[in-house]
Image (cartoon, rainbow, N blue to C red):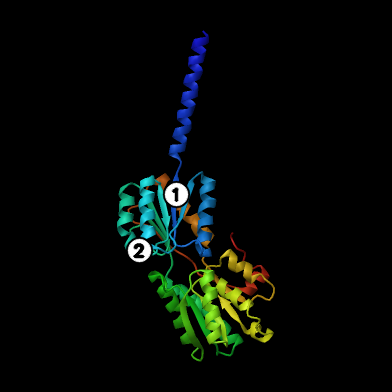
Amino acid sequence: MKKLVSLVLCVLMLAAMVCTTAFADDKVVIGMSIPQLANPYFVSVMNGVQARAEELGYEVIVVDAQYDVAKQVSDFENFGNQGVDCVIACPIDSNALVEPTKQLKEAGIIVISFAQIIDDANAIFTLDEYSYGVVIGTNAVKWINEKLGGKAEVLIISQDNVEAVVARGNGIQDTIEKECPEAVIVARQAGDNPTKGMEITENIMQQYPDVRVITGNNDSGPLGAYEAILGMGLSEEAMAEFYIGGGDATPEAIAKMQEENSIYRATVDLAPFQTGIDCVNCLADFLANGIPEEAPVSFFKCVPVWLEDIESGAFVSAE
């Protein structure tokens, strides 16, 4: 009898182990490829992905491509070898991901792209780059015309090192040149993280000490510009005139806007945290209802956020 009981217990324990293993094997795993984790926008999207995935019991594996196209291609290949269920990615070079994406899809792995487009992705969350630049540029134009009498020396911190984002910088530049014909753009340089933004600002201010407007393709470079200007000991008059603005409404930028006497005047809300949530919700829908033949495309809304919106409580960050 004791042997029978022991046998039954062993069978039950083995069954429990098998069930536990099966549950682990059935867990949905997301691979996430980030172009650069030094960029606060991508961190916000990542946080949204992780927050929603945790609610649904999914696992997330995040890799930083460090703006290296070859590394991102390799990361896609590694995700395929790992057998993840889905890859959520912003491409550095869309063309370079054509074949890796094809291979992932052939292996039954769902591919979702955000911000820049992966053409053959199963779902796309994106924006019109030029139009986004126009909104960012319009913020700078408002400051130049209302506060500086239409005249200003301007620095644009772009992302011209990323081909897909050059159009955004063009939108900024074209808008300023059109709406503020007496303004002078003294430089347009690529700075896709705060460190680069700081370096560019320090160098340009040495050459053009009368620059009073710095606008970026996003919030990343301008965050560095903000710190650089604070460290220069400019006069109260100069600081009162100074405009730093960007885009993406990242938590880091909102925090700078909340500082006393902030010169970080404006950003543009793309709801990056919500984008991360939306990507995971899209995956959940595909898993429950199947993958549609035609990839759904969702466009971000570009909503200007001014310092006054922060101070009045009209804007509240989702993260």
Is 83 situated above or below 207? above
Mark identifier at residue 86: none
Residue 222: x and y in percent read: 55, 73
Cα gap from disc 2 to disc 1, whole angstroms: 20 Å
* Residue at x 49%, y 45% (from the top left corner): 58
Q: Secondary structure at mark 2?
A: helix
Kind of residue indicated by mark 1? Ile
Q: Residues within 10 Å of mark 2 (few under 14, many from 20)?
A: some
Residue 50: x and y in percent read: 52, 52
Q: Is residue 265 visible?
A: no
Front residue of 131/172: it is: 172
Looking at the rendering, in which quadrant would you find the C terminus? Answer: bottom right
Mark identifier at residue 94: 2
Report if the CB atoms under discs 2 and 1 are less than 8 Å apart: no
* Residue at x 42%, y 78% (from the top left corner): 170
Q: Secondary structure at mark 1?
A: strand
* Residue at x 39%, y 69% (from the top left corner): 164
Q: Is residue 287 visible?
A: yes
Which residue bears the numbered disc 1?
A: 30
Q: In this image, 18 relative to 252: left or right?
A: left
